[in-house]
Amino acid sequence: MICLESSGSCEEVRRKILGVSWNENAFFGTKMAEGSSVQGHGVKMLSLVEKLEDLKVGVDNDTYIDVILQSLPPSYGPFIINYNMNGLEKSIHELSNMLV
């Protein structure tokens, strides 16, 4: 079977080979519930990032960081403001460590 870049079936084959069942809302729609574990949320988000990277979707680090910050509840507002105002350039793993 030959897969063309624009073919949707190519992506399905790639997912089957990688053993990944993917729904884009799993990452972009994930929200941390107020009062829940930020550590657990960080682990979940890192796992979803790794799945995206396995699928080679081409999302850059800044986008990952933005989505993770947007997934935090309102009580993390001061942290998000501090992160953005200080122009912190961190990896996803460093951000996860900062949240804990």
Image (tube, rainbow, N blue to C red):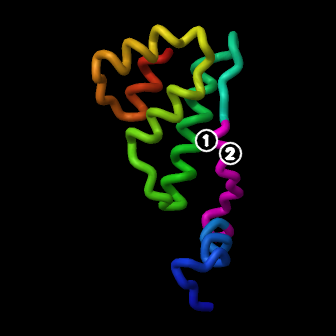
**Crowdedness of circle 1 by 10 Å Cα count: few (<14), some, many (20+)?**
some
Q: Residue at x 70, y 52 (%)?
A: 23
Q: Residue at x 45, y 17 (%)?
A: 80
Number of marks in the rendered image? 2
Label 1 residue SS = helix
Label 2 residue SS = helix
| Residue 18 sits inside the magenta stretch | yes
Residue, disc 2: 25
- Splitting the image into 4 quarters, where does residue 43 fall? top right
Residue 3, above or below 88: below
Q: Residue at x 66, y 58 (%)?
A: 20
Residue 14 image offset from top left, x and y in percent: 60, 70
Report the amino acid beneath label 2.
Asn
The alpha-carbon separation of the residues under discs 1 and 2 comes to: 5 Å
Q: Quadrant of the N terminus?
A: bottom right
Residue 86 image offset from top left, x and y in percent: 29, 16
Residue 54 badge = none
Residue 19 image offset from top left, x and y in percent: 67, 62
Q: Is residue 53 rendered to the left or right of residue 71?
A: left
| Residue 41 sits inside the magenta stretch | no
- Splitting the image into 4 quarters, where does residue 34 fall? top right
Range drawn in magenta: 16-29
Q: Is residue 69 rendered to the left or right of residue 8?
A: left
| Most foreground residue, 69 or 54 | 69
Report the amino acid beneath label 1.
Phe
Residue 1, above or below 14: below
**Crowdedness of circle 2 by 10 Å Cα count: few (<14), some, many (20+)?**
few
Q: Are marks 1 and 2 in contact (CB under 8 Å)?
A: yes
Q: Residue at x 54, y 84 (%)?
A: 4
Residue, disc 1: 28
Residue 60 image offset from top left, x and y in percent: 40, 48
